Amino acid sequence: MLTFILAAAIAASGPVLRPDNIPEIVSLLTLEEKAAILVGCGSTAFDGIGRNDIGVKGSAGATHAIPRLGIPSIVLADGPAGLRIDPTRPGTDKTFYCTGFPIGTMLAATWNPGLVTEVGRAMGNEVLEYGVDVLLGPGVNIHRNPLCGRNFEYYSEDPVLAGETAAAMVDGIESNGVGACIKHFAVNNQELNRLHNDARLSARALREIYLKVFEIAVRKAQPWTLMTSYNYINGTHASEAPWLLTDILRGDWGFEGTVMTDWGGGYDTAAQIHAGNELIQSGSDARYNALIDAVREGRLPMEDVDRSVTRALELIVKCPAYMGYEHSDAPDLEAHAAVCRKAADEGVVLLKNEGALPFGPSGITALLGVTSYAFIAGGTGSGDVHRPYVVDLQKGLADEGFTLESGLDGFYGAYMVDERWRCANVDGKNSWVIDRERPIEVVPVELIRAAARTADRAVVTFGRVFGEGKDRDLYHSYMLQDRELQLLRETSKAFRAQGKKVTVILNIGGVVEMESWKGLADAILVCWQPGEEGGHTVASVLSGAVNPSGRLPMTVSKRYEDEPSAPNFPLIFADKPFNYSFYRRLEGNKKDYTVKDIDYTDYEEDIWVGYRYFCTKARDRVSFPFGFGLSYTSFRWSNMRVARQDGAWKVCVDVLNTGGRAGKDVVELYVSAPGRDMDKPARELKAFAKTPELQPGESCTVEMTVAESDLASWSEESGSWVVEKGRYRLIAARNAEDRGLRRKIRI
Ligand code: BGC
């Protein structure tokens, strides 16, 4: 049980902050004190992402305390895959590791909001027990383009899947009495020139795609806080836009929480406060002075300041710091590792399986690819976590009782000693923003040929890591590299010649091109960046102890050029120097829009993002569709029924496990609109449901709801949501391309 004491009240005599006296406290604050509450404590070392030692070492930021009125400082720390604080502190041998959970994309790939809430509960408990008040996550921006360097932190190309996942995560985190922070509001879809890029898009694309995910999360979960993004939207800085922060966020959606800037984001402090951006993070003397000057010079009304201070205090009175919670610095990391494992088990997506999987621990497994021996738990930048360990696939397989082919095992064992040393050396010199150095792929041809004779199957892992501040390189990150292809070709040739199967594991933060090489693999398993327990998860899926039930949260197109946003996304080349967020620093608020995709990005694809585009306009350009994922068992769906209930449609489908293994299935409910008065995608996801684990022969009924308002599109003419009249089709499908079961409804 949580034991809270009102520490703040003890610190002061006279009126002190209480949830019911905020107006009185605001009236007692001086202008300087108000500015101190709104402008954060700053970063002790601003290394591109927040880094603060005030409060909790290695957290991202904090607010100033005003002890005379019993107002405590609250601590803010990243991020979406778990709490990011320093794992060690001077003067103590104690460690402060946090659980490295699966990345956001993998959580979305579970299609299981209940499970995501469980992850959030565990994450939030670490926030509470390490003395932090607000977790700077989840990140919910839309996967507009597969090369965005932060996609791994985000959920999906679809706003319904992303919004539902975000709401579930917020509920879980906040069940601990700590805050969550949905970020980055809004249209933050590229890292190149991220502080200054102007995202230019239609009102329809904005409302239906890029804001929709935030709208769902706000309406469903009402998060304590929200973070504005670095970029501009149609010429206004996101953190300085009243139409966004006041009219839409609070006016249209009813947001009741507190808004903060991204770290160092925006230029004009007075404009930010006026727009409805309460906390200026991470804060600096310049920001503090700018706020005070703006009030003194009459450029910022005191009512705006008071409104912001009120909202900041409304946040503070909910926080553990205000409650005087005595944190233990000892969360149950073992229990949380089990949650991490459980979530990862459900997020693995089986893309291809031609009789290769599962293979159980008997026989000999040839384990190839440097990533098998150096698993990637998560991405870099503020979405990174200082986790206590990472289980790689070699260890995962050994723990599951697999026998590894000894020639390759010995070879990689020796090779990786040097490579690990080299990587640690390179990383030691790099700042946070650079891609983490990875072991160089190697192709031990003779050993592969020998292994093909003695082993029973081959498993090859390819890995990708990237993160904040830099987008992915098309040729080095999105495509398989020459050595990787060579490794796969040699392995495939040698093993198939012996009638043996080859499985490819993709340990990635975002998709890679697969069309050109998928024929070389008998099975393809995407394990994303699965957190600290990854090797165990993959071993359980290979052995069949876990039946994969994840589904793609994005489309895998055949070629990068097929992506609808490809003509309007910056291409990065590893050997060019302009890879960073700070590439073009525009002077102050001056908008010098000259370079396409850097100074500005035109969202010419409009609402045709991901499967909306592919299903409607380019069906033949897809390797694996949105929502796709295989299982070791089979399911039969029947009896789709639709009932009108309280202004919504209740849709039920019976799911029967017709195969030989226990497993879970996902029913995706798409809607196809008449599309006569408006240009509409062939289908759009409106709801989904994951079954419980069904034993062979067992069945269940899943239930999903679609409200009439879910059918609306944003009309540019009327500037409002409009539900087109006519006949709609409800489609219960296995993925965006599946014909599925269908029922008609009429508006
Ligand atoms: C990132 C945010 C993060 C903040 C604090 C910024 O660079 O964009 O996502 O929460 O730093 O670390």
Image (cartoon, rainbow, N blue to C red):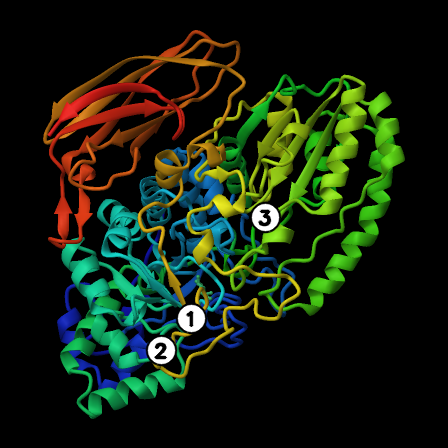
Question: Whole-percent x and y of residue 535?
Answer: 64, 36
Give the distance between the C-alpha atoms of the residues marked 1 and 2, in whole angstroms.
8 Å
> Secondary structure beneath disc 3?
helix
Find residue 599 and name its label: 1
Q: Are the residues flagged by discs 1 and 2 in contact, CB closer than 8 Å?
A: yes
Residue 285 found in image quarter: bottom left
Disc 1 C-beta below 8 A from ligand 1: no
Question: Whole-percent x and y of residue 463?
Answer: 65, 45
> Secondary structure beneath disc 2?
loop
Question: Whole-percent x and y of residue 637?
Answer: 35, 14
Find residue 591 and name its label: 2
Q: Is residue 87 above or below residue 341?
A: below
Question: Whole-percent x and y of residue 72?
Answer: 33, 71
> Secondary structure beneath disc 1?
loop
Q: Mark 3 highlights which residue?
A: 478
516 sits to left or right of 643: right
Q: Is residue 747 above or below residue 49?
A: above
Q: Are the residues flagged by discs 3 and 2 in contact, CB closer than 8 Å?
A: no
User: What residue is shown at x 63% (from left), y 20% (from top)?
Assistant: 358
Foreground: 576 or 289? 576
